Amino acid sequence: MTAMRHEIRVIFGDTDQMGVVYYANYLRYFESARAAYWRDLGKSYKDLVEWGVALPVVEAHCNYKRPAFYEDLLVIETRVSELRGASLRFVYRVERGGDLLAEGHTRHAVIGNDGRPKALPDVLRSAIPPIS
């Protein structure tokens, strides 16, 4: 499936003393791209609350290739690469002008209000494009 694309402009507060985007901010960019992914599907994290589920991050990884800087326009491509009974995995590519800056993934548990594993609601599962 084609990945969803989300743009983020690097703000000054995202950079370190060397003027480079601080490494941990890439995880924030991943989160922003995930929220945009759900919006592109016509859903929201608010829907998850209504359905009685949460998607906490249980694993995160980022492989840094090149630095990003203040005012850079970043494009984060996001897609679901794996969908299990009570978990899913997103993969990300962060690019600037076609250059790959970073790539990574997050794995999310699906839990109910009681904190126990729960199946992803069918309405959400059916909204996720087919995984190839």
Image: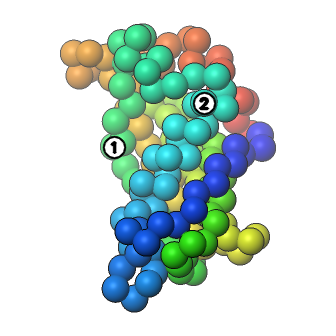
Q: Evaluate if marks 2 and 1 touch, with contact meaning CB atoms under 8 Å apart.
A: no
Q: How many marks?
A: 2
Direction from residue 52 to residue 98 in the image, left or right: right
**Residue 31 in picture, x, y percent from top left:** 46, 46
Choose top left, top right, bottom left or bottom right for residue 52.
top left
* Amino acid type at image mark 2: Arg
The N terminus, quarter of image: top right
Against 43, residue 74 (above or below) is below
Direction from residue 48 to residue 34 in the image, left or right: right
Name the residue beneath numbered marker 2. 39
**Residue 23 in picture, x, y percent from top left:** 40, 71
The C terminus, quarter of image: top right
**Residue 128 in picture, x, y percent from top left:** 65, 27
Choose top left, top right, bottom left or bottom right for residue 71.
bottom right
**Residue 10 in picture, x, y percent from top left:** 52, 66
Q: What residue is shown at x 45% (from left), y 81% (from top)? A: 20
Choose top left, top right, bottom left or bottom right for residue 46.
top left
